[in-house]
Amino acid sequence: MGEYRLHRGWREANGLVTDQVTSGQTITAPSAYAAVAVALADGDFLVTVDTNLAWLTDDHGALVWSLRLDDEDLISGN
């Protein structure tokens, strides 16, 4: 079993991440894949007005998953 931490923040257009917050919950899961499922179920933490980026780190602080939310680059043009 590994331990994972869920984070959220605001990603500026230049890629700079600001207003980082780390969830108070430690996700204990058998794999990063299982930890992502738990993280996605935590909508109250992930979906806030001041968030457009979420990511998951392992117990060594290494990035194992990230999700860009409401990215203008993903909206198709007219």
Image: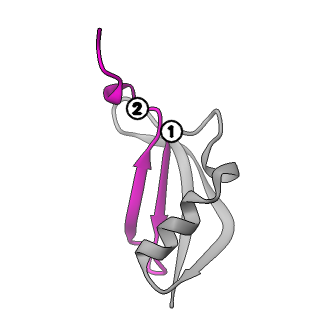
Point out which mark residue 6 bears: none
Residue position marked by numbered label 1 in the rendering: 52
Farthest residue toward the top?
A: 78
Q: Nearer the viewer, residue 39 or 53?
A: 39
Query: Which amino acid does the dot numbered 1 rest on?
Result: Asn
Residue at x 33% of width, y 32% of height: 14
Q: In the visual, does 51 lie left or right of 72?
A: right
Q: Position of residue 60 (x, y in %)?
A: 44, 80
Q: Is residue 33 magenta?
A: no
Give the mark nearer the N terminus: 1 vs 2. 1
Q: Residues within 10 Å of mark 1 (few under 14, many from 20)?
A: some
Image position of 39 with respect to 72: above or below: below
38, above or below 7, in the image? below
Residue segment shown in magenta: 53-78
Which quadrant of the figure contains the C terminus? top left
Which residue shows up at 48% across the image and 66% down it?
Answer: 36
**Residue beneath disc 2:** 71
Q: Residues within 10 Å of mark 2 (few under 14, many from 20)?
A: few
Question: Answer yes or no: do the residues labelled 1 and 2 have beta carbons within 8 Å?
Answer: yes
Q: Secondary structure at mark 2?
A: loop
Marks 1 and 2, how far apart at CA = 7 Å
Disc 1 secondary structure class? loop
Does 15 sit above or below residue 33? above
Residue at far left of view: 77
Q: List x then y, in percent, for residue 15.
A: 35, 38
Q: What residue is drawn where x is 42% and y is 50%?
A: 67
Q: Is residue 69 left or right of residue 64?
A: right
- Of residues 15 and 23, the one nearer the viewer is 23
